[in-house]
Amino acid sequence: MSFIEAIRLALQQIWVQKLKSFFTLLGVMIGVTFLIAVVSIVGGMSKYMSEQLVGKVIAINSFELRRTPKINFHGDEETQRELRRRPEVRIEDIAPVVAALSPGTRWAAYAANGFNVESRYVNKPKPASFFGVTDQYFEIKRMEPAKGRLFAPQEYVNAGNVIVIGDEIATYYFPSVDPIGRELIIKGAPYTVVGVMEKQGSAFGRSFDQFVMAPMNSPLGRLKTPHGALNSIMVQTPSRDGMIAEMQAVREVMRTRRHLRPSQKDNFELETSESALEFWNKIKSYLVVAGVALPAIGLVVGAIVIMNIMLVAVAERTREIGIRKSLGARRRDIMSQFLVESATLSTVGAALGVATGFAFAKLISMVSPLPAAVELWSVFLGVGIGAGVGVIAGVYPASQASRLDPITALRAE
Amino acid sequence: MSQDIIEAPLGATAERQAVVRATGGAPDKDWVIVTRGIKREYDMGGEIVRALRGVDLAIQRNEYVAIMGPSGSGKSTLMNVIGCLDTPNDGEYWLNGTRVSSMSEDELARVRNKEIGFVFQTFNLLPRATALHNVELPLVYAGVSGVERKRRAREALERVQLGSRVDHRPNELSGGQRQRVAIARALVNNPSILLADEPTGNLDSTTSEEIMRVFESLASEGQTVIMVTHEPDIAAHARRVVVLRDGLVASDERQSAFMEQLRRGGV
């Protein structure tokens, strides 16, 4: 008997007993629903983490030399204390670090702090993150001005009183006028806005558009870092492979400058987007284990229900089995008929579970800040699991059916 | 009961010779069925029931045979053995020149599919399948492709005058029509023998006559028909009657002689 034929027969059987079939499918359906929901939400968060959060904070193919990691979820006191004891990365570190880099490598340093920004147009000051940056910063971060321009080379050198501002600062202070050429007052001194940057968005409620940037050497830059401390020296290589070599070069320079013995650990951070994502990957692995283990219980229950229903079906259809055997069905024909039936039953349940799982994930992402991403592979996984559960649950009943003696089976009521 | 092997009476010398010849190997191709010393015993909770105690039987191609006997005579067991649903404990059975008495389960399934067409007392149609699908079933297991299957199933249904009822389910058909669907199903894979077990047992006399006319015409077209029945007037349609008693062949007569015996009230 052909496979398609067997599936058709199985679907027919399901359709004839709709309600019974539905209850049979419920276990598998719920199992797959939660599996899909968890996979979608974890996948969504993962995507969010790498694209939105880390992708915005740390540029592609780049690493940052920092005192402490930018994204720091290490909870234990020991680590925190070690981090606090680390010396600052300083302006004086720039020249030796840059000297160690291969040609073609981009770099930029920045120092950041929060200041209140004032304007003569708006009375209430607004806090903003202030960045003093060097010239390749915007290139590395792939930030483009939406209006106006970036800093000119001589403005980096001559330390002009010029700033570029984030979208949110622009709309706050200049809701109805063109901000280009206007002034903002920071720590009592006026600065001219030369550019408004493209909207950067936000992650976990933190806006990336609430910034003011100036050349590092400007008065504002010096204001930020009176003692020469830097937040970060960013290095970006043309390729992923080059990045590792550059990281090694920078590490050696820094260890030498800080006179670290071979036994001592780095007292600075070389942070990549991967290392920033490490904490998340750790959480994710727990979530995935929980997200797979819990639905698995549902699937086991589902398998037991299907096995029971199939045993009932074999008992109810003993005569049919006898008829089929008398007409020439071999053991394996009967076996595959019931296996396909139980697999089809289970797969239909899994397919329903995939649908409700996605609906569930969407619902969660609508009512909570958790994002959901529909992953194609999880559809195949869900349906595949359904078929697998069906086959496993069907083996025993199907082999019972295939072993029936045709004469006895034909006599059954 | 005596355990001695009783020399089974055979209707004609030809049959006896066929059985004897078969001892040495495969019998002549003309003989569709040759059994020699078939024994079948059941263990019914410690008690051994000897349903068949050494049946010798030879049936030629194109014969129309009725197997008769009171209940408990072993005729159902014999039918199961002939139909390859059951295997004998002892003795040999050649179907179409092939020894089937020692075949495996799967080989027997293949033989049932290719050589035997069953017609049961209770029709044994799949209740939820249409007449056409019921008739298709043997071809499904024979591995015939969909289009060819449908064509042959339709043809078989037309042969039993049910060409207009192909899409009806068994519960939409009368008893006689159901049995004709079953006959179409039995014939669809061109079996060597049509094996009917009390084919009119669940039918009224008018319908019974109708079904017997179907058998009659099939037999006259050259189909080998073996029919198990306990009703003498149904058996009277056959051209040869084998009577079983206590697991042995009690008589094996050509119809003319059998009719004579019927008239004397001997059966």
Image (cartoon, coloured by chain):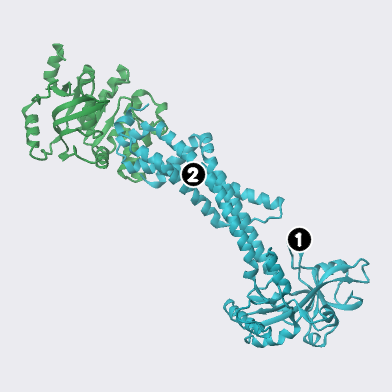
Chain colours: A cyan, B green
Which residue appears farthest toward the top when viewing the image?
B264
Give the mark, 1 or 2, whose residue is nearer the N terminus. 1
Q: What x and y, as percent, mark residue B102?
A: 19, 39
Q: Which residue is mark 1?
A: A205
Residue identified by numbered label 2? A346
Identified at 30% across, 17% down, the residue is B205
Q: Is label 1 in a helix, a strand or a loop? A: loop
Q: Residue at x 40, y 43 (%)?
A: A395
Residue for point 77% across, 79% down: A229
Quarter of the N terminus of chain B within the rendering: top left
The alpha-carbon separation of the residues under discs 1 and 2 comes to 42 Å
Label 2 amino acid? Ser
Q: Which of the two residues, A305 or B247, is positioned nearer the viewer here? A: A305
Q: Amino acid at mark 1?
A: Gly
Q: Nearer the viewer, residue A9 or B166?
A: A9
Residue A124, relative to residue A42: is it above or below? Answer: below
Determine which of the numbered discs, if any, sits on residue A378 in the image: none
